[in-house]
Image (cartoon, rainbow, N blue to C red):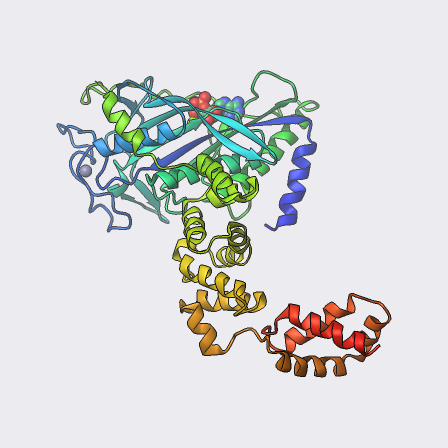
């Protein structure tokens, strides 16, 4: 799907007479070494069913033991999301039958979640909007089913990996806001270093709930829940599709009896770009929750909470404000620099090594970010280290290379990882400021472009830019453009 198509859909969305209401449920695998109620490894990608034991396979007579680290990581997230932390930790059994759940119940938290009443700010255009977090709770992951032609396989390695469920209030009013929420959430989670946050590998999963209502209505409309998206972009596209589907139904429903939105779970079909019904939820599931008798409730020690809080690093919002204050960045630039941990580290390292923060943000947001997007790499894995960028920028400032050469040099360093100063020497990329050499190049350019020379003489000042460009071309970007322009003006003025 290309940009214009998204654009069209969006404009249709904003023209409809309904308000879109979205709430998101995010499941996050916490990156503990062992599972949440047993000692099995959580390594990703091991041979199927090699990381299992009687506890996570649900054999009778085995007792779960809570992984302290999982609880700490969960609390870390909850604090970063401005939640109130429960003083009493209690687990419950959520009962249902499914082949990927060997105990026939999932240990989860029901009426006393780990945390509640949080908030997460998203930036929409010029304004900031708070999305309320309803609850954050700890539970265990299920196994994984692989359906084949006429059989199904199951891998229990995932069974018992700690999951944190983060449930928002239905506070988002467009697919765009849902996208921004997920991006902001992921950014915080990455700063906290609690999960791989990899949607493709399933360490971060999102169920999106969406309903429509007439603008101005207080009551929520009937919602559907969409599953099976494997990227944030997918979530947005699925929500755009579903909003339109619901709007069409609502419109029809005013005329045709029987056309209405059914509360059901939908699967997003990535290939077709549509949502398809999975199962009807009209009869709400009865999970027969009851307290987990094998894990007695306990109090969260105040001192433990304090320790966790102390270990929370500077998060995007305060970091952004510090960037504005310390480096005099604009709000926009600071928000981008702080939005992800690796970019922030990269920027700050350059700021220390080189100074002139605005120049650094220009390069990061320009050529570097374009490369990163096109090649789907992370800034922290680039061959172009902050040291390299800084030394390049210093070479521009001291007139050793031109800005134009710097652009090709940048790509060279990204490809080879070589030191930019060495590359400049090796390839002879130094800027040409020698008047004699420049005059030779200028001489041939003016001879080759008599029309532009005439234009300039007739008073068309723009023509000089064209001629400077030609000299740059001739010198493969190495001529000092200011000097070239100076010499050209002198020469042509004299010739008048
Ligand atoms: P369920 O029992 O189906 O899981 P919940 O009430 O627990 O539903 O809410 C789950 C998620 O759905 C929450 O993120 C909540 O904000 C969102 N949600 C609930 N009702 C609606 C609605 N009518 N429209 C959009 N989102 C909703
Ligand atoms: Mg739900
Ligand atoms: Zn186990």
Q: Quadrant of residue 443?
A: bottom right
Camera-side residue of 469 and 39: 469
Taking depth in this image into account, of 333 and 229 the one nearest to the observer is 333
Q: Is 457 placed above or below 158 here?
A: below
Q: Quadrant of the C terminus?
A: bottom right
Query: Residue 451 at what x, y percent from top left?
Result: 82, 77
x, y percent for residue 103: 23, 30
Q: Position of residue 277 (x, y in %)?
A: 50, 34
The quadrant in which residue 350 appears is: bottom left
Q: Residue furthest right?
A: 458
Q: How many marks?
A: 0
Q: Is residue 130 visible?
A: yes
Does 185 sit above or below residue 495? above
| Foreground of the two, 361 or 62 | 361
Task: Identify the residue shown where x is 25% and y is 47%.
Answer: 43
Location of residue 253 in the rendering, given as x and y in whole percent from the top left corner: 66, 24
Residue 223 can be seen in this image: no
């Amino acid at each position: 799907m290309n940009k214009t198509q998204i654009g069209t859909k969006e404009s249709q969305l904003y023209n409809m007479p309904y308000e879109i209401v979205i709430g998101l449920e995010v499941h996050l695998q916490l990156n503990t070494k062992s599972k949440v109620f047993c000692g099995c490894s959580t390594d990703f990608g091991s041979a199927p069913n090699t990381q299992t034991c009687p506890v996570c396979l649900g054999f009778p007579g085995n007792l779960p033991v809570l992984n302290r680290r999982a609880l700490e990581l969960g609390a870390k997230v909850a604090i970063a999301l401005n939640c109130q932390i429960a003083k009493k930790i209690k687990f419950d059994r959520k009962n249902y039958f499914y082949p990927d759940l060997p105990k026939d119940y999932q240990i989860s938290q029901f009426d006393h979640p780990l945390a509640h009443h949080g908030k997460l700010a998203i930036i929409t255009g010029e304004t900031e909007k708070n999305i309320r977090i309803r609850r954050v709770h700890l539970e265990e992951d299920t196994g994984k089913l692989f359906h084949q032609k006429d059989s199904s396989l199951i891998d229990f390695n995932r069974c018992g990996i700690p999951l944190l469920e983060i449930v928002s209030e239905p506070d988002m009013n467009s697919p765009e806001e849902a996208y921004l929420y997920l991006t902001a959430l992921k950014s915080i989670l990455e700063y906290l270093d609690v999960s791989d946050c990899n949607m493709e590998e399933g360490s971060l999963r999102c169920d999106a709930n969406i309903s429509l209502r007439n603008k101005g209505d207080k009551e929520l409309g009937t919602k559907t829940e969409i599953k099976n998206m494997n990227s944030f972009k997918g979530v947005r596209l699925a929500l755009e599709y579903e909003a339109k589907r619901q709007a069409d139904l609502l419109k029809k429903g005013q005329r045709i009896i029987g056309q209405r939105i059914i509360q059901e779970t939908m699967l997003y079909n990535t290939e077709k770009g549509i949502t398809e019904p999975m199962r009807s939820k009209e009869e709400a599931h009865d999970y027969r929750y009851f307290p987990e008798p094998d894990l007695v409730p306990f109090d969260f020690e105040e001192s433990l909470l304090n320790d966790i809080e102390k270990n929370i690093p500077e998060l995007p919002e305060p970091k952004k404000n510090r960037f504005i204050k310390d480096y005099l960045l604009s709000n926009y630039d600071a928000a981008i620099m702080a939005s992800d941990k690796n970019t922030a580290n990269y920027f700050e390292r350059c700021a220390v090594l080189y100074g002139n923060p605005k120049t650094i943000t220009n390069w990061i947001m320009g050529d570097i970010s374009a490369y990163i997007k096109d090649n789907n790499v992370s800034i922290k894995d680039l061959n172009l280290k902050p040291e390299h960028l800084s030394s390049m920028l210093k070479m521009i400032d001291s007139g050793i290379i031109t800005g134009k050469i710097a652009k090709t040099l940048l790509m060279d360093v990204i490809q080879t990882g070589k030191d930019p100063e060495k590359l400049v020497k090796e390839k002879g990329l130094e800027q040409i400021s020698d008047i004699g050499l420049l005059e030779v190049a200028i001489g041939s350019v003016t001879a080759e472009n008599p029309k532009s020379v005439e234009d300039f003489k007739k008073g068309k000042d723009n023509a000089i830019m064209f001629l400077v460009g030609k000299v740059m071309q001739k010198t493969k970007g190495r001529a000092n453009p200011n000097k070239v322009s100076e010499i050209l003006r002198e020469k042509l003025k004299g010739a008048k």
